[in-house]
Image (cartoon, helix red, strand yellow):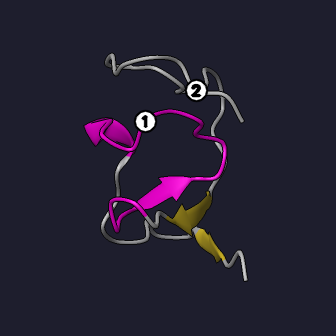
C-alpha cells in the first residue's frame, strides 16, 4: 500500500457512512476503523476504547 508523503489533517479519512469494525494499530497502540487508510497521527481516527456496538477485528 502506498502512502502520501508527509502528514496533513484529514488525510485518508473516507467520506460517507463509516464502518463499525476496528483493528489494533501496531504503531500507535490505539484502535482505528478498518476503512481508515491514513496516518495514525490523525487524532480524530485514534480510539483507545472500543465504541459501543463496535467489533474488533483480529488480523492473526
Q: What is the secondary structure assignment of the residue under circle 1?
A: loop
Is 24 above or below relative to 18?
Answer: below
Residue 33: in magenta span = yes
For the residue pair 44 and 26, the one nearer the viewer reads as: 26
Predominant SS of the magenta segment: loop
Of label 2 and label 1, which has the lower sequence position?
2
The location of residue 20, given as percent across then percent down, is: 62, 56
In the image, the segment drawn in magenta is: 27-45
45 on left or right of 33: left
- The residue shown at (43%, 65%) is 51
Which numbered circle lies on residue 39?
A: 1
Which residue, given by chain and number where applicable, does mark 2 sit on? 3
- The residue shown at (46%, 70%) is 52
- Res 49 → quadrant: bottom left
Q: CA distance from mark 2 to mark 1?
A: 8 Å
The location of residue 22, given as percent across then percent down, is: 57, 62
Is 58 above or below relative to 4?
Answer: below
12 on left or right of 39: right
For the image shown, how many numbered marks are present on the structure?
2
Amino acid at each position: 500500500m502506498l502512502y502520501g508523503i508527509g502528514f496533513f489533517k484529514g488525510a485518508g479519512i473516507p467520506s460517507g457512512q463509516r464502518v463499525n469494525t476496528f483493528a489494533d494499530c501496531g504503531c500507535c497502540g490505539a484502535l482505528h476503523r478498518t476503512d481508515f487508510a491514513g496516518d495514525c497521527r490523525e487524532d480524530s481516527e485514534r480510539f483507545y476504547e472500543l465504541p459501543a456496538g463496535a467489533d474488533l477485528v483480529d488480523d492473526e
